Image (cartoon, rainbow, N blue to C red):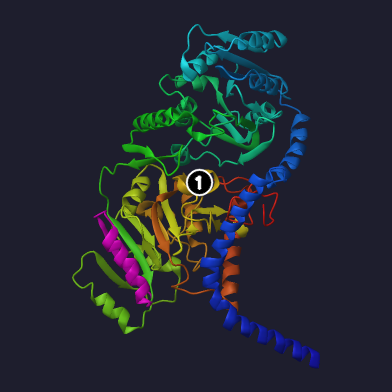
Amino acid sequence: MKKKIFFRRAVALTARLVKIYIFPLFPFIQRTLLPAAARHRRWIQARLQSRYPFLPTAYDRWLKLEAQRHDEVANSLFPCEKPLISLVMPVYNVRPAWLEAAVESVRNQSYPHWELCIADDCSTDSALRPLLNRLAQEDSRIRVRFLAKNRGIAGASQAALEMTSGEYVGLLDNDDELAPCALAEVALSLADHPEADLVYSDEDKITPDGRRYDPFFKPDFSPDTLRSYNYICHFSVIRRERMLQVGGFRSGYDGSQDYDLLLRVTEQATSIVHIPKILYHWRAVDGSVGQDGRAKMYAYDSAKKALADHLVRLGRKGTVQDGLFLGSYHIRYELRERPDVTIIIPTKDKVEVLRRCIDSILAKTTYENYTILIVDNGSRHQETFRYYSSFAGNKRVRIIQYDKPFNFSAINNYARQHCTSEYLLFLNNDTEIITPDWLEEMLGLGYQDRVGVVGCLLLYGNDTVQHGGVIVGIGGVAGHAHKFFAADEEGYFGRLHIVQNLSAVTGACMLVRKSVFDEVDGFSEELSHAFNDVDLCLKVREKGYLVVYTPFARAYHHESFSRGLETSGKKRERFKREIRFMQGRWGKVLRQGDPYYNPNLTLVKEDFSLATDEFLFS
């Protein structure tokens, strides 16, 4: 009995010491130590890999599992419908060994119903003609055409397309390789999705000595992501009828001829299917874009030209600019009108926090047609009310009272009843605007058809990422993408620094079209504290709208200043209850996986590391 009493007292004392001495350190740990640890982990990984390339990586471990999956596909039974897949390959002065490896990767396919259509673009390397003739003689499925004059890669690709007879056309560069089961995976996917006009897969790079690295695990089709860069790229298989309908490859877009084609195909496609498997190996050799993105600078001008044409076809006005890193692009959409925006800010005392937020909006925002609606939720300090009185006669700022217990969803739903504007901007009081044109950027995206919600990049005060979008499924419900990355890091294949579609964004800074907000009945008031923003975004997506994240609108989020840390048993129980609510309402979505993420990536961390390895150096 005495031992039990001693044990209970020891536990109680330990809990008290933790609460007094450890919990106050959490903000410091969160804003300083965790980001530093994450940065050092990535730095150590890079140094180890560059100095000791023979060390196994997380991807090497993933490849062992992939080999087993490939064996399963190779032995699978194909459906009765076995479509002929035509592969188009433009050739120009490629190293013969790489060309032969590319062709051999096609001949090694477990799926036999293919043809390889090669157009040699008047190569000057005398070794290529006899090699191509020999390859065609060895396999009747290989067809070769020698062009009389050089047409450029777009012209050569079109010449190869004219040779095709298959129902579907796959794109293969003359020095890359297909995975042995690539065409089998495509055929199986087409059997499941016979309406598909475009099928694409994940990809990686391959060194001259055959080592595979740098896997790119992609999201499902994301139109705004595609407008930021050609993430679809390899391996792409397109319905031939659709390909011809949109005009095939166009001259004048050399270096980005595939990007131009994909933009036109996706505009018309009935269905687009993503196979979340590595089916293509992009060879990284000297002079290739796989090795050095600066190898073909002309390609980026072609890409911007293709995007400008894309906007014209869609009837949208905007300017195509270079993005935040080479090979990415930023469309500045033109606002044909200047719609009203109400910035809704719930708050309770802590006037110094609110003042910084309001001052940053008023001082920096270049967009004119907005008002600020402060929703006071039970403030008691006189300093707060003196601050409110400073807005007397200010038409830019309104203040309303919400006198019920704190409920983020209910407060914002109540605020919506006091808004007549076309757009609602939900903003936490512990934010601070960084980019002056933040509203123009978010409105430009929110103004587009079928876009329902727009979120932005939020940083901690030490310029590390607090929010780069939300990935559904991380931690059981949702987590913030690229959390603790440095603001100048590009993130996973640049995704931190591009406009893209996501499943959700945080309500700490969220633009919503009011009609869409009303259509989904606003925030769910069962979620008073957590996941209400994720729930709203999922409801919006359920109605067919898109959620968009932009890094070109930025703010600081001095998180935890307003509400503090949730450490009490009551708060923990409420958090568990809200998790259960999300899992009950969105269980099917959580089980299926986030379409804007990838099943090969982790659901434990927020850094896009591989799901096969959850250790420190994964």
Q: Position of residue 284 (x, y in %)?
A: 60, 32
Q: Is residue 597 above or below residue 255?
A: below
Identify residue type, mark 1: Arg
* In-image side of 346 versus 114 (left or right): left
Q: Residue furthest front?
A: 51
Q: Residue at x 41, y 42 (%)?
A: 323
* In-image side of 41 versus 545 (left or right): right
Q: Position of residue 386 (x, y in %)?
A: 27, 80
Q: What is the secondary structure assignment of the residue under circle 1?
A: helix
* Span shown in magenta: 349-377
Q: Position of residue 187 (x, y in %)?
A: 66, 27
Front-most of residues 309 and 453: 309
Q: Is residue 36 above or below residue 594?
A: below
Q: Residue at x 69, y 35 (%)?
A: 211
Residue 139: in magenta span: no
Specify the quadrant that holds the N terminus. Answer: bottom right
Residue 544, can we see it? no
Q: Residue furthest bottom?
A: 2
Q: Is residue 380 above or below residue 158?
A: below
Q: Is residue 323 above or below residue 522?
A: above
Front-most of residues 208 and 591: 208
Q: Residue furthest left?
A: 393
Residue 249, can we see it? yes
Instruction: Please give the residue where the numbered disc 1 appears in the rendered image.
Output: 495
* In-image side of 46 versus 3 (left or right): left
Front-most of residues 363 and 527: 363
* In-image side of 552 versus 288 (left or right): left
Q: Residue at x 35, y 57 (%)?
A: 424
Q: Position of residue 259 (x, y in %)?
A: 47, 29
